[in-house]
Amino acid sequence: MSVPELIRIVSRDSPMALAQVERVRAELAVLHPGVRTEVVPVKTTGDKWMGDLSKVEGKGAFTKEVDAALLAGEADLAVHCVKDVPADRPLPAGTVFAAFLKRDDVRDALVHPGGLTLDELPAGTRIGTSSVRRVAQLAATHPHLECVPFRGNANRRLEKLAAGEADALLLAVAGLERIGRTDVISEVLSTEEMMPPIGAGILALQCREDDRALIDAVSGLGDPDTYREATAERMFLHVLQGHCNSPIAGYARVDRGGELSLRACVFTPDGKTRLNAHEWAGRLDPATLGTSVAVALLRQGAREIIDGIPH
Ligand SMILES: NCc1[nH]cc(CCC(=O)O)c1CC(=O)O
């Protein structure tokens, strides 16, 4: 196998994204000690626009410019949070996922400067989040709390919290680990309390599909269990055809015995209706499991809920 001499890695330029790139570089250095890497940072629409994401094509806002640089040959390898890669449509033509790195924590954390837990927060506490998934679940379990729109990369959100623009935040544990800020966590929420988004905690490596040498060189960074989980979760979302305002949550898990299961939910924005499904793959491949769970939710009325939400 001939490994390329230089691998140019493109990614968003947020501190979290650059930390992700450093993880990829470190893992590549172990696998291929001779290889040189270069970082090509780009700003995405999602980084520049601080308003409502549904106003700027919504999904793909964090990936479009990264994909463009890859396709234009300005870089060879893109690093994406799977969570930010649209699943309702195929990957941009001419690109493929070459590896899913070993999954990080899938859970969300509460960041409250006073160190309170979610259940201890007083009525009227302002939670900074623009995530329809988080808003719907909080409305169901903690209706006395108030969500206020909050955008920007995780470091920016922590700054805005410190400036008093909200009283507390919900952020992914994995993201806080990557930026080295787990010190701000006041409570890690269980997946029952706050079901994670599809693709949580997974980094994907994306290449041009004709770049065989590079695909071969980086595929060794892939984790087989994470591949199964990501495949089931993304097929679930593909069949469901949500939009960027759809409160959808779910995660697949390979248990110690190697069995894959997928649980998922669709909520109304007010959290009052929650559809649930949980299935084991058994002899089904991961993508078929994803389809089966999506069909189970569609039978319960997921289509009507999703289509009834303005977007
Ligand atoms: N939308 C931004 C984003 N994309 C991925 C993560 C977290 C890390 C991950 O799940 O890979 C975050 C931040 C957050 O939701 O707190």
Image (cartoon, rainbow, N blue to C red):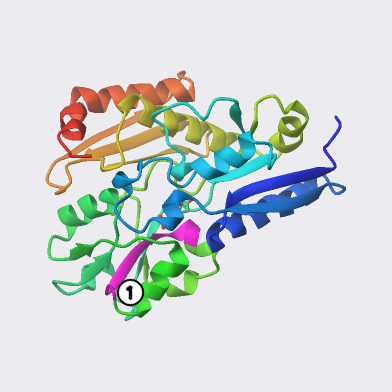
Q: Residue at x 34, y 74 (%)?
A: 161
Residue 61 found in image quarter: top left
Which amino acid type is shown beneath numbered disc 1? His
Location of residue 300 in the rendering, given as x and y in whole percent from the top left corner: 18, 27
Residue 101 in view: no
- Numbered range of the magenta stretch: 165-175
Q: Residue at x 43, y 68 (%)?
A: 156
Location of residue 135 in the rendering, given as x and y in whole percent from the top left corner: 23, 54
Left or right: where 167 falls relative to 21: left
Q: Which residue is mark 1?
A: 112
Q: Residue at x 17, y 61 (%)?
A: 142
Residue 298 found in image quarter: top left
Determine if the magenta segment contains residue 294: no
Location of residue 247 in the rendering, given as x and y in whole percent from the top left corner: 26, 43
Q: Quadrant of the N terminus?
A: top right
Determine if the magenta segment contains residue 171: yes
Q: Residues within 10 Å of mark 1 (few under 14, many from 20)?
A: many
